[in-house]
Image (tube, grey):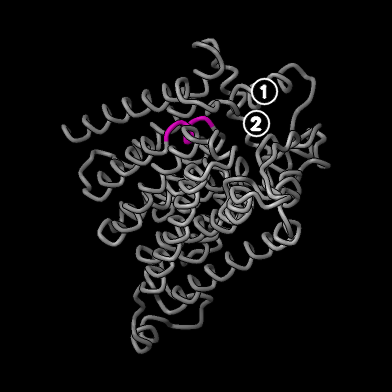
Amino acid sequence: MANRGVLWVVFVLVHLFVAALGWVLPNQPMGDVYLVYEPWADAALEGREIVGITAPFVYPQLALVPMIAARALSWVGGYIIAWVVVVTALNAVAFAVLIGRARSRGRVAAAWLWLGYALLLGPIGMYRIDAVTVPLAVMGLLWLAGRPAAGTVLLAVATWMKVWPAGLIAAAFVARRRRMTVVAAAAGVSVIVLGGIVALGGWAHAFDFVGEQTGRGLQLEAPVSGFYLWQAVAGVPGSYPYYDTGLLTFQVVGPGVDIVIAAMTPMLAAAVLAVAMLGAHKAWRGATYVRLLPPLALALVLVLIVFNKVGSPQFQSWLIAPLVLWVALDRTRASTAAGLSLVSAALTQIVYPIVYGGVLEVQPIPVALLTVRNILTVILLGIVVGALIRVPTPPAAQRRGASSGPRLFARSP
């Protein structure tokens, strides 16, 4: 009981501190909330336009729900405070599901990891739409074993806010035995969401978020953008960062950039497929759900970051859910990935928002810090893929004895 009380006290302190950092750190870490989310919510509530329904939207349609919820709570102290309340409340629910009565050492360790990661990542982990999807993903992963339908529903809802949890659904499909439960739950959520979009007359914008992402250039913070950033540092003609007024983000250009832009989406798809096939091979050979799902989920999420041409700093918050699951189930084997992820989170906060102005001015030290962060993310992907390769499988004779007939993959929960 005492341990649980300490965890909740630290939970409150971390969220208050991170929320306050948004007000004092440079480069507008809260900018998306009051410059983008609030106007979108106001436009919808005032009947002017509904992004994703009557106007293009860079996110899936359910992303508008927490934005409107924050507007409904703005009486507590304005829209920014209301957004903090929404994010903190969702995190509190997921945190309660995670720690329970704080009797599991693994779950307590996972809770401390989450709090430490949130503190090191800073305000970017709170003042973005990704912050709403993280607690849904945490609960979804924790519920997959005992309540696969409920867990998948949460992951699917999160996916219709920001696409990245689709990687967790893919991991669940590969690692579980009852795969049709995962498919049916995810499909059911999608049918309901799409039905609502059609009923509101928004079919023409139903999949705008797909085109918005595939049509983007190289965002400044993406690992692939490092080549052009260092060319800009060196003064290579034609290499420089610029602000895209349509997407409201900084991107980079340089010689041959269009070829790289065109190649990134196929490379991302190929990398996701390769990791999924590795997981499927392990499942087919009889790897257990508990050993397979955590590294597979984390590897797929890391692929979505490393091979992404967008690379926003808040993407690092995606690591929380699979890391929490892995530490809760197997904290010893997860320790290396967890430790490296904490370093990556700290570097992310230093880069954005603290020295982000220097990155925009292509100063060598800030660009070097961003480069180190990106290299660490790539190394982390290599470590996790290595852990996935080492997931044990039973001998062939034991697999034959445990199976009474052919299956798509081997037995798992």
Residue 303 is covered by the magenta coloring: no
Magenta span of residues: 122-127
Where is mark 1, residue-wise? 41
For the point 48% across and 39% down, the residue is 351
Q: Earlier in the sequence, mark 2 or mark 1?
A: 1
Q: Amino acid at mark 2?
A: Leu
Q: Residue at x 55, y 40 (%)?
A: 359
Asked if labels 1 and 2 touch by Cβ distance under 8 angstroms, the answer is yes
Within the image, what quadrant is residue 99 found in?
A: top left
Question: Relative to 123, does residue 134 appear above or below in the rendering?
Answer: below
163 vs 370, left or right, is right
Residue drawn at (41%, 21%) of the image: 20
How would you rate the neighbour count of disc 1 (Cα within 10 Å): few for under 14, some for 14-19, many for 20 or more?
many
Pinpoint residue 384: horizontal percent, then vertical percent. Answer: 41, 63
Residue 95 in the image, given as x and y percentages of width and height: 35, 37
Specify the principal SS of the magenta part. Answer: helix
Label 2: how many Cα within 10 Å (few below 14, some 14–19, many 20+): many
Going by the image, does 304 lie left or right of 287? right
Q: Which mark is residue 403?
A: none
The residue nearer to you, when weighing 126 against 183, is 126
Q: Please say whether residue 135 is visible from this viewpoint.
A: no
Residue 47 found in image quarter: top right
SS of the residue under disc 2: helix
359 up-or-down from 123: above or below? below
Is 124 contained in the magenta span? yes
Identified by mark 1, the residue type is: Ala
Identify the mark at residue 64; answer none if there is no mark: 2
Q: Is residue 114 left or right of residue 253?
A: left
The answer to whether residue 247 is seen in the rendering is yes
